[in-house]
Amino acid sequence: MSQQNPSVEKQRSNSRPSSVQNGRATDRLQFAVKITLKEGVRDPQGRAIQELLARMGYDKIADVRQGKHIKISFHDADPESAREAVNAMCRDFLANPVIEDYRVSIDDA
């Protein structure tokens, strides 16, 4: 059994996740998008969740707001241009700017 070089293992663990595309390894860059209703916009799903939780005995909850969590992965992408693309996706399609806010972050998981 061969021993792994610790510095190589550390370097691998600090790099971005990789995947295989067309038979070759590629770096993968993943973003997390969190979409929530803006303050002041009624949230009937959040209200229904809160009422159900109260009936289950969780009666100290002051408010529940529900939203969406989306993960988007890119292969071999420049981080800045990929982030700009994700923001454009949110503005153009994923979020309704009239009633929703969104936050984009790099997802390390």
Image: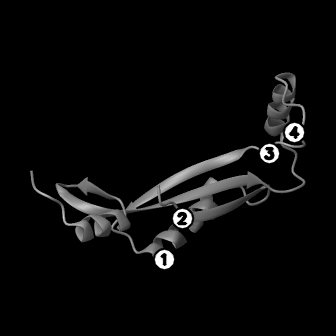
Q: Residue at x 90, y 37 (%)?
A: 60
Q: Nearer the viewer, mark 1 or mark 2?
A: 1
| Inter-mark Cα distance, 4 to 3 | 11 Å
- CB of mark 4 within 8 Å of CB of mark 1? no
Q: Residue at x 66, y 63 (%)?
A: 103
Q: In this orientation, which residue lies closer to the viewer: 80 or 63?
A: 63
Q: Secondary structure at mark 2?
A: helix
Q: In this orientation, which residue lies closer to the viewer: 57 or 44?
A: 57
Q: Nearer the viewer, mark 4 or mark 3?
A: 4
Q: Circle 2 is placed at which residue position? A: 86
- Label 4: how many Cα within 10 Å (few below 14, some 14–19, many 20+): few
Q: Circle 4 is placed at which residue position? A: 61
Q: Nearer the viewer, mark 3 or mark 1?
A: 3
Image vertical order of residue 47 relative to residue 95, above or below: above
Q: Circle 1 is placed at which residue position? A: 80
Ranked by sequence position, the earlier of labels 4 and 2 is 4
Q: Circle 3 is placed at which residue position? A: 65
Q: Nearer the viewer, mark 2 or mark 3?
A: 3
Residue type of the residue flagged with mark 2: Val
| Inter-mark Cα distance, 4 to 2 | 33 Å
Give how far across and how far down residue 91 sits, in percent.
64, 63
Residue type of the residue flagged with mark 1: Glu
Residue type of the residue flagged with mark 3: Arg
Q: Secondary structure at mark 4?
A: loop
Judged from this view, the residue extending furthest toward the top is 55
Q: Quadrant of residue 43?
A: top right
- CB of mark 4 within 8 Å of CB of mark 3? no
